[in-house]
Amino acid sequence: MTSISSGASSLPKRVLIIRFSQTGQLDAVSDQILEPLLADPAIHVHVETLRPAQPFPFPWPFLDFLDAFPETAHMRPPPLAPLSLTGDEDFDLVILPYQVWYLAPSQPITAFLQHPVAARLLKGKPVVTVIGCRNMWLKAHEKLTSMLDSVGARLLDNVVLTDPGPTFATFITTPTWLLFGRKRGFWGMPDAGLDPAQIAGARRFGRALRDGLHSDAERGTQPLLAGLGAVVAEPRLYFGEKVGTRSFFLWGKLIMAVGRPGSAQRKPLLVTYVLFLATLIVTVLPISLGLQALLRPLFRGRLTKIKARFELPSGSANDRRHRYDS
Ligand SMILES: Cc1cc2nc3c(=O)[nH]c(=O)nc-3n(C[C@H](O)[C@H](O)[C@H](O)COP(=O)(O)O)c2cc1C
């Protein structure tokens, strides 16, 4: 736990940020958002770093990486090391950055949201979620918002930063990064992960949160980060995500039935599944995208609705960026 006070103030606004990042990418985004808050003497920031009781490896050994999917998809994470918070603290605003694992929130974030302390901390509180992931976050966000609903928290804003590379390049560069630690692009493909300009640009969200806190806007129902290009949803990926989620769920159930995480009995099934999954990625995803391209006129209304739903509450408009970009 780190508690950082940005200066003396008789009535500071209290902000809680939850942190977990394996490569440091999401922490780098959080640092940018926090900087304007920490520089403000009227804002007090509490940083809670999540530590799984048994750390996840990085880079991931191949079978450990696969072995994480059943419990991720079923949202049954292993416990966290004790939190520094008791649940009696009172925050004005909660910032919840999270990464996506297997089309669901990462296990440490799910573990936090299922923790009894989170239920007490978040009840009735405005929450700003910040996603940093490859590019498939729609189903994860559905799951995360339903966990927020179940603890009675209020989603005030959602920021989404996704890897800028083309989808099919990131299907190669992201696993290379996660399994071998190699972030640099190769064979003409871009580097894995977010680019430095996206990370630096996240500071605009911190500036707007700071201004919002000064005018008590976090108490209202309107987003604080509208007009800042907070989220651009790609509705064409939704159908592929639905198929993927279903498949993770069904295979995950089977794999969990044969053994605990890390057990030898799971390995043959994991290897069978990865072959199935690779087939799914090279067949279902392009077929789904191709069919949607062909049938776009028929699907247009549906895709527009999906896009609008997932861009809530902060939206994709950029009309206030000039005020917050620097
Ligand atoms: C086990 C695992 C599964 C992942 N699954 C997805 C996914 O389904 N969709 C996605 O967009 N990114 C996925 N990612 C990428 C992460 O969301 C994230 O971009 C990356 O792990 C870096 O995050 P960090 O801040 O923890 O270092 C996955 C990463 C891991 C480790």
Image (spheres, grey):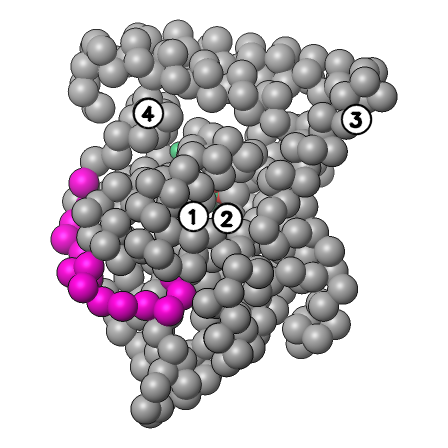
Q: Secondary structure at mark 4?
A: loop
Q: Is mark 1 within 8 Å of ligand 1?
A: no
Spatial separation of the CA atoms under disc 2 and disc 4: 20 Å
Q: Secondary structure at mark 1?
A: strand
Q: Specify whether residue 73 is painted magenta.
A: no
Looking at the picture, how far across and down is residue 43, in whole percent? 40, 80
Q: Secondary structure at mark 2?
A: strand
Residue 175 vertical position relative to residue 257 in the rendered view, above or below:
below
Looking at the picture, how far across and down is residue 304, in whole percent? 74, 33
In the visual, does 222 lie left or right of 320?
left
Q: Which residues are magenta?
A: 79-94
Give the residue pinned by disc 1: 98
2 or 4: tag closer to the N-terminus: 4
Residue 157 vertical position relative to residue 47 in the rendered view, above or below:
above
4 or 3: tag closer to the N-terminus: 4
3 or 1: tag closer to the N-terminus: 1
Give the residue pinned by disc 3: 300
Are dots 4 and 3 in contact, CB under 8 Å? Answer: no
The dot on residue 131 is 2
1 or 4: tag closer to the N-terminus: 4
- How many residues crowd mark 3 within 10 Å: few (<14), some (14–19), many (20+)? few
- Residue at coordinates 31% horizontally, 30% vertically from top-left? 75
Q: Is residue 164 visible?
A: no
